[in-house]
Amino acid sequence: MEKIQTIAMTIVEKEELKKFLPHRELALILDQILYDKDFPYKIIGKKFILEEELYTAGHFPGNPILPGHWQIEMFALTAAVLTKLAHPEIVGLPKLISVKTEFKRPVGIGDELTIYAEIVNEEKMLGYPLFTFSGKISNQQKKNVSIIQELKGIAS
């Protein structure tokens, strides 16, 4: 008999994200988080790029695309929520100290982004927890738009 694996994802909507993140208004650039407690070091974020949002305004007129720094911010926020879920004892959020990213494709109005983040290492730096994350951001065609080779954050 074939064993069927069930996935018990917890869906965290934008309003509920405010419990994990101090970000508000335009700085809260995530729409949704999906988390499975059976895989505590992995998380999925969602972002729908809408025309009325200001992230693409003026970048570039006639062909708006999402700037790369907003993609990094999406990933960093997803990683921050993962840190809070995996380590609820940590007060505050990890502060970004370094990132290595490769941008593969432009992101435009109407794109639906899926942000995959994973904690790949934990250590101490000056007595504080240092987290290393890796992951990717994909579009609705499941094509990678960004590869995050390494993002490091320190919790203080």
Image (cartoon, rainbow, N blue to C red):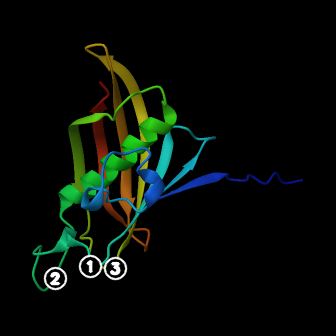
Left or right of 75: which side holds 32? right
Q: Nearer the viewer, mark 2 or mark 1?
A: 1
Question: Disc 2 residue type?
Answer: Asn
Question: Disc 3 residue type?
Answer: Gly
Which x, y percent locates residue 97?
21, 34
Residue depicted at x 23% and y 54%:
102
Disc number placed over residue 52 in the picture, else none: 1
Left or right of 26: which side holds 11? right
In terms of image quadrants, where is residue 152? top left
* 2 or 1: tag closer to the N-terminus: 1
Q: Which residue is mark 2?
A: 63
* 3 or 2: tag closer to the N-terminus: 2
Residue depicted at x 26% and y 58%:
71
SS assignment at label 1: loop
Disc number placed over residue 117 in the picture, else none: none
Cβ atoms under marks 1 and 3 closer than 8 Å: no
Q: Could you say which is closer to the camera, residue 84 or residue 44?
A: 84
Q: Which quarter shows the C terminus?
A: top left
Question: Disc 1 residue type?
Answer: Glu
Q: Is residue 34 above or below residue 55?
A: above
* 1 or 3: tag closer to the N-terminus: 1
Q: Farthest residue to the top: give it.
A: 127
Residue depicted at x 50% and y 34%:
86
